[in-house]
Amino acid sequence: KGWTSHRISSKNTRVSDTKHRTMAETAAVAPPETSSLPPMASILKSLLAGGIAGGVSRTAVAPLERLKILQQVQDATKPQYTGVVQGLIRIWKTEGFRGMMKGNGANCVRIMPNSAVKFLTYEELASFILRKMRETDPDANMTPVLRLCAGAGAGIVAMSATYPLDMVRGRLTVQRSGEGAQYRGILHATGLIVRSEGLRSLYKGWLPSVLGVIPYVGLNFAVYESLKDWLLKRNGLKNDQDLSVATRLTCGAIAGSIGQTVAFPLDVVRRRLQVAGWQGASEITGDAADSLLKSKGTAHYNGMVDCFIKTVREEGFQALFRGLMPNYLKVAPSIAIAFVSYEQCKKSLGVELKIGD
């Protein structure tokens, strides 16, 4: 009876404090009897739901993703993909449907573990930060800056864990279809890259990638969660489940657009470093550029800074944002499809977990 009275009293003292709180914040201040980790089966089902949703959403926007990468690495003096519509038509005419979806298999293989690690790490970091804050201030809440830090940490861990898959996807996406294709699939590409360029080549472009996920994933979480908090307070709502799906999709689209704009130059550098040293890259980047940028052996760039300098010097500052428009166009539908797919998977698997992306 004493334990029950204490539990009820504890719940009553937290009613006002649980308003406008994200899942990570709620978990951080949950009563001891409900703060234990969920069963492993529940965790696995949650990860599966998020992974399936990520795969479906990425597949839906795969043509735009490939066009973005082709625009990032193409020869600026003889661009083959000058716009979204023109680029998609060219891919369709020259390579067909398979060309539109090239690299998507590797992308889907990558996104499942990436999403799992990213979201779990974010929730753990956010909960840890909030618990530490409330040791000195019981009324403390997550701020946009703290959410950005938790998101950045989650992005770094997820990117580092799955980077070799992203590297291979970049190569598969850039190469042409047909008899001239150098790579036949994920495993073949991985083995060939390691044999011809060394094991370290699987991490080409890792530094700009990690630097890129700091603002991208960090802003994604920070802006998304902060926008929801603002809407909850403005409308007098208690939790984010009271917000409509359309409202949450809008918050996600805004967050994704802001994050991508800030991090996009680093994404361009990452792609260029990934195809540097690959003999087949000259088909896309152009023989002139290939010859111009060679410095030692087959390496086009001496690192991230060198890639930045040469790209801006030879192609102009605008080259750092090449491919941004198709990237914008894929943000809203990708997030929308991810939410719908995730909700359906969650309902089928009987899992209650919100992914805030």
Image (cartoon, rainbow, N blue to C red):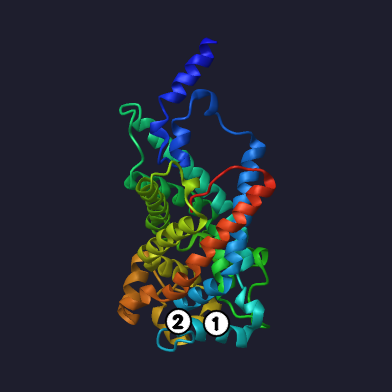
Q: Is residue 194 visible?
A: no
Estimate the x, y position of residue 161 in percent, counting from the top left: 53, 51
Rendered view: 99 above or below 349: below
Residue at 37%, 31% in the rendered image: 132
Residue at 49%, 87% in the rendered image: 80
Task: Specify the amino acid type for callout 2.
Answer: Asp
Please identify the quarter of the rendering in which residue 188 is found: bottom right
Cβ atoms at labels 2 and 1 below 8 Å apart:
no
* Residue at the top extreme, as displayed: 2
- Per the rendering, the mark at residue 290 is 2
Is the N terminus in the top left, top right, bottom left or bottom right quadrant?
Answer: top right
Q: Nearer the viewer, residue 294 or 248?
A: 248
Residue at 52%, 13% in the rendered image: 3
Estimate the x, y position of residue 285 in percent, counting from the top left: 47, 81
Q: Mark 1 highlights which residue?
A: 88
- Give the mark nearer the N terminus: 2 vs 1: 1
Is 185 positioned to the left or the right of 114 in the image? right
* Label 2 – label 1 distance at C-alpha: 24 Å
Rendered view: 131 above or below 145: above
Q: Nearer the viewer, residue 350 or 19?
A: 19
- SS class of the residue under badge 1? helix
Please identify the quarter of the rendering in which residue 178 is found: bottom right
Task: Specify the amino acid type for callout 1.
Answer: Leu
Is 119 positioned to the left or the right of 269 in the image? right
Estimate the x, y position of residue 101 in percent, counting from the top left: 62, 73
Estimate the x, y position of residue 82 in percent, counting from the top left: 45, 85
Q: Nearer the viewer, residue 323 or 196?
A: 323
Please identify the quarter of the rendering in which residue 211 is found: bottom left
- Per the rendering, the mark at residue 119 is none
- SS class of the residue under badge 2? helix
- Frontmost of labels 2 and 1 is 1
